[in-house]
């Protein structure tokens, strides 16, 4: 299988995280009310959860959970009491529901400290290739 590099700031590149976000929303099942891709730099996405909570993902810090305050596809989502879930940038979708449950319970690896796994400015660091795995899964 050939490795496909996606050129930064193309429509395909902007949309690349949506395939990962969709998989996480599917793993959350009935907990996920809706989801959307967010603005760029860094690329981000939000999953609104039942009960007024939300998950926000970005390509620098991974997932954070908290109370939804505001946000939409054109603006950054604001959370109250945000906790980062840990587990890296692309926490396995099937692991996210347990990480959310742990964060809600105040246990596990969640932290208020923002991790920085990479910079969104590093276009050829292999991260987009990892995202391609979710694109390929959607095409299958």
Image: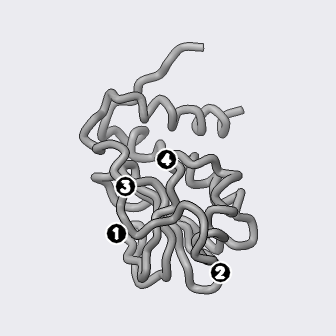
* Res 50 quadrant in image: bottom right
Question: Judging from the image, what secondary structure is the residue with disc 1 in?
Answer: strand
Q: If you read the primary sequence from the N terminus, does the residue marked by circle 2 or circle 1 appear first?
A: 2
Mark 3 lies on residue? 115
Estimate the x, y position of residue 81 in percent, counting from the top left: 43, 80
Residue sticking out furthest to the right: 30
- Is 27 left, or right, of 34 in this rendering? right
Q: Secondary structure at mark 2?
A: helix
Toward which corner of the image does residue 99 lie, by quadrant?
Answer: bottom right
Give the mark nearer the N terminus: 3 vs 1.
Answer: 1
Mark carried by residue 88: 4
Q: Residue at x 36, y 50 (%)?
A: 60
**Residues under labels 2 and 1: Cα distance?**
20 Å
Task: Read off the residue under disc 2.
Answer: 50
What is the spatial separation of the Cα atoms under label 2 and label 4, in whole angstroms? 24 Å
Tell me the residue that label 1 is attached to: 76
As measured in the structure, the alpha-carbon distance from the residue carrying label 2 to the one carrying label 3 is 26 Å
- The kind of secondary structure element at disc 4 is loop
**On the rendered image, what quadrant is the N terminus found in?**
top right
């Amino acid at each position: 299988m050939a490795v496909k590099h996606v050129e930064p700031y193309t429509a395909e590149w902007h949309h690349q995280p949506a395939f990962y976000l969709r998989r996480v929303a599917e793993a959350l099942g009935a907990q996920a009310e809706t989801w959307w891709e967010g603005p760029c730099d860094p690329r981000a996405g939000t999953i609104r959860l039942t009960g007024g909570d939300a998950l926000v993902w970005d390509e620098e810090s991974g997932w954070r959970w908290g109370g939804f305050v505001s946000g939409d596809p054109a603006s950054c989502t604001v959370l109250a009491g945000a906790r980062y879930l840990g587990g890296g940038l692309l926490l396995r979708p099937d692991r996210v529901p347990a990480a959310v449950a742990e964060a809600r319970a105040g246990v596990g690896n969640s932290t208020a400290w923002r991790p920085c796994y990479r910079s969104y400015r590093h276009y050829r660091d292999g991260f987009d290739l990892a995202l391609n795995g979710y694109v390929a899964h959607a095409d299958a």
